[in-house]
Image (spheres, coloured by chain):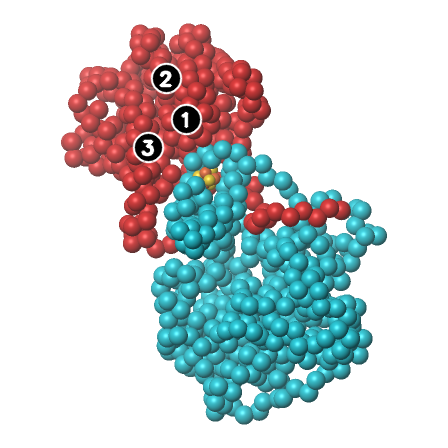
Amino acid sequence: MRLFIAASPHSRNPQDVSSIMLNVILALVPTSLLGVFFFGIPALSVIITSILSALAFEVGVNTLRHQKLTIFDGSAALTGLLLALTLPPVIPLWMVVLGNGFSIVIVKHLFGGLGHNLFNPALSGRLFLSVTYPVAMSSWSKPSALLDPIYISSATPFAKESTLIVSHWQLFWGGVGGSIGETSAFAILLGAIWLFKKGILDWKIPGSFLSTVFLLALLGGQDPVLHLLAGGTLLGAFFMMTDYVTSPLTKMGRLLYGFLLGVLVMSVRFFSQMPGGLAFCIVLMNGMVPLLDKAGITLHLHVYPLIFKEIQEK
Amino acid sequence: MNNHKKITGLLPTREAPAPHELIFPLLQHTGRPAQPIVNVGDLVKVGQRIAEATGSISANIHSSVSGLVTAIEPAPYSSGVDMMSIRIENDHKYFKVPMATHTRPIKETPKEFLLKRIEEAGIVGLGGEMIPTHIKLRPPKPITELVINGAECEPYLSADHRVMVEMTKAVFIGIEVAMCILEPQTVMIGIEDHMIDAMITMRNYALKYKNVKVIHLPTLYPQGAERVLVRELTQKRIRQLPIEANVVVLNVSTCAAIGQAILNGMPLISRVITLSGSQLEKSYNYRVRLGTPIKTLLPELSPDRAHKLGDLRVLMGGPMMGIAQYSLEVPIIKGTTGVLVLEHTNYEPQKCIRCGRCIDHCPVFVMPIIAAEQGIQASECMECGLCSYHCPSRIPLVEKIRLKKIEQQMCTINP
Ligand code: SF4
Ligand code: SF4
């Protein structure tokens, strides 16, 4: 028997970094499965290539930086999976590897590794690819012919006004053209609910973002439900914006972040036809996070106690 | 958070085994250490005063056994450094000093008399904060609310729970005394809702009193922290001490000690503690004599049986705010709420992943990671431990905030 001394507290919440990452990966399983279901084997190979190459790059960087291996914290695998979900299913696999290299090596590790990266690695990788290979990145394939062909459109619903022929139901259940992960709102919501239950997902960013989008769409005279369900809005809201490292730290900062993102995304959607505009907006906003942190601290000190009485642990 | 209250919550209090040698540290309260008034070789009796308060904030200390004073020397102490202490050898005869009982109704007793008795009995806050009670009962301004803390929010601990169930009368005498001294408009007793039996007993007893309300609180750590409790019950926000908002907070065990001191003239020589933890086979609620070294209570950790055990943390207090002990010689003091034996886990801190959980969970609106790095709001932290508990990167936030506080205090002393 040995007696140890250490500072209080003497017990910890069992949920540590790797279990959080694992839970987020689990929450993305329905989305990935539906992606594979709709787009077939190409989607599966994109997902697998992406995860494996992300892990490989992580190991490579760890070796170069003489660090302990960090692949077991799950963050690299998560980056790989998230990147895959934003890609079109028919993309050449070497591009997937390249995108992951950009994500892991440049965006994540050159900035200092997990916890220090300013930009969301998965989204930056996707943007890198869409800037470098615009053609491959916008070749959206048709979902497999299992589905009723009437509902199938071959572009993401926002690409052109004229192709807006999908129904809300279809957007909800899946089967719309687009990247692997954005077809089914249902699967994404399922994952989000799981994360919410686990206490991993905080409502503030998705809440303020989605309500801003909804209200602005309403004000702009467009279909608000369409705006919520299509174009990867939900994937972005629940899995991309809420990335811990690249979102603001304070509660007020998060509310503000969601709101500003909503405004930005809607102005892109109203005034330009850029496909994948959401990814641009999020990465742009990531750059604002240090500023929002400062604002968030000030607001937390002076405004927060006036608005919220008490939010305590359950 | 699992509060582990089921282990001991319903176990009746037992008399703890008596040790052969007791250790009475001279500092069992906040303020100045008491001054010994016995010498080596003196014979003392149960309840005899062995050290006297010095200075404006201090408290008396009494012997809890009869026997021989063997030494006055530094001895192991629960804060982690040795403390000047009086060692007494127990003769197991328990001769008592005469104690004055009190039969007059409390309401007709002069305030000063009550305060004097409390002061003489050496009563301090038994919830762990150990502020001498007679100081608390002489507030610098009039009091509007008296809050009685029966929340006992720390996991594992159930000492206050048992006190409320088994010593209800003493608790209410104590409350009556405090009411008589402070003359508050309302008295609120806050009890966490997992202690159903305590709630029923206290509610029934409270019916006899006007303006005493028993309020049940959700079971949430840190419900029993003064600032959280006062905010929950009175809707007043305080930054440091309850007196800012004309509130006085007393723990239920403190009230029971006041009750006994007034009724039986019994000084504070014993208290109820919880002995529990994942590494112990049997858990108890014990009434222990102050000064009992914890090894007496932990036969499972004795050298001949301990080889089966791995790495341990022996805590005084709860798992969130308790102090890990370096020796099993450390005695139970007035502020010890429990002794826990938990397994030791080494947590490897990683980089902050900016998840914001520490901020979400802080009950007093501090931003722990910001306080730890930049010192903003560090002085408002009450060290409840929730931020470190929840940090997925295992960053020792409370430790860092403590360092910041010390740094800031140094800066204000010599700028
Ligand atoms: S900063 Fe941490 S230890 Fe301090 S009060 Fe807040 S949660 Fe508790
Ligand atoms: S809980 Fe830990 S990892 Fe999360 S923001 Fe606070 S310090 Fe950073």
Residue type, mark 3 in image: Val
Residue B388 to residue A237: above or below: below
Residue type, mark 1 in image: Asn
Q: Nearer the viewer, residue B66 or B300?
A: B66
The disc label shown at residue A117, or none: 1
Residue B405 visible, this orientation: no
| B77 sits left or right of B372 in the view | right
**Same chain? Circles 1 and 2:** yes
Query: Picture coordinates of residue B130 (x, y %)?
Result: 55, 67
Judging by the rendered image, the residue that carries numbered circle 2 is A126
**Which residue is rendered at x = 72% and y = 71% of the image?**
B15
**Which residue is rendered at x = 49% and y = 53% of the image?**
B383
Circle nearer the N terminus (1, 2): 1
Q: CA distance from mark 1 to mark 3?
A: 11 Å
Q: Nearer the viewer, residue B2 or B361?
A: B361
Query: Picture coordinates of residue B4 (x, y %)?
Result: 60, 54
Q: Which numbered disc, 1 or 2, marks the residue closer to the eye? A: 1
